[in-house]
Image (cartoon, helix red, strand yellow):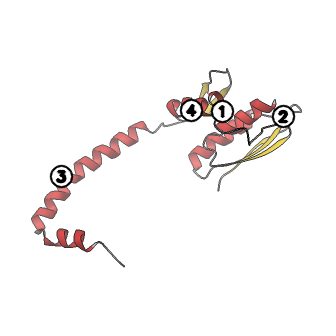
Amino acid sequence: QRVCPIMWSTVAALPWWALAGLALVSLPILLVLVFIILLQIPKKMSIMELPNKLKVWQWNKGETEWLYEEIFEDDLYTSKQIKLNPGAVVFDCGANIGMFAVFCHHKTGGDVEVHSFEPMPKIHAVCAANARKFTDANGKKCLHTYQL
């Protein structure tokens, strides 16, 4: 096991009281950072109406607005090389809340089959909730989600 010799020799050269002082100074800062992060984590998912009047489940309004802008307005997920035609089969790996799947459904009028993969359990729950909201013209489920 290799470690940086300069770093360890510097730390090893410090007296025990200096190391204890560093720990005491660093701990409150670390606790404040953890507290700030925890305050920003939403406690439950909620429904948000997008600018195009579609309603989606989401965790974080700012992130959902950013995803909408990136996917729907700027159309960054499709390009001249990638065409999204009715009848397409799409694999969305790292689907987040399923916004791209919603976009595919919207763009093709529901004539699409999307397989969305999201590993994070809480985020997958939102993705699955969004997938359940959208069906094809015959009422058949066309957005499928998988948690890996």
State which tag comes first along the sequence, 2 or 4: 4
Q: Residue at x 82, y 42 (%)?
A: 88
Q: Residue at x 52, y 34 (%)?
A: 63
- Mark 2–mark 1 contact, CB under 8 Å? no
Q: Quadrant of residue 65?
A: top right
- Mark 4–mark 3 contact, CB under 8 Å? no
The x and y percentages for residue 74 are 62, 30
Cα distance, mark 4 to mark 3? 37 Å
Residue farthest toward the right in the current orientation of the protein: 138
State which tag comes first along the sequence, 2 or 1: 1
Cα distance, mark 2 to mark 3? 58 Å
Give me the disc on residue 38.
Answer: none
Q: Assess disc 4: are there few (<14), some (14-19) or many (≥20) residues with their C-alpha within 10 Å of its C-alpha.
A: some
In this figure, which residue is indicated by the disc labeled 2? 136
107 with respect to 43 (left or right): right
In this figure, which residue is indicated by the disc labeled 1? 75
For badge 1, the amino acid type reads: Asp
For badge 3, the amino acid type reads: Val
In this figure, which residue is indicated by the disc labeled 4? 64
> In which quadrant is the N terminus drawn?
bottom left
For badge 2, the amino acid type reads: Asp
In this figure, which residue is indicated by the disc labeled 3? 25
Q: Nearer the viewer, residue 78 or 103?
A: 78
Q: Nearer the viewer, residue 74 or 120?
A: 74
The x and y percentages for residue 24 are 17, 55
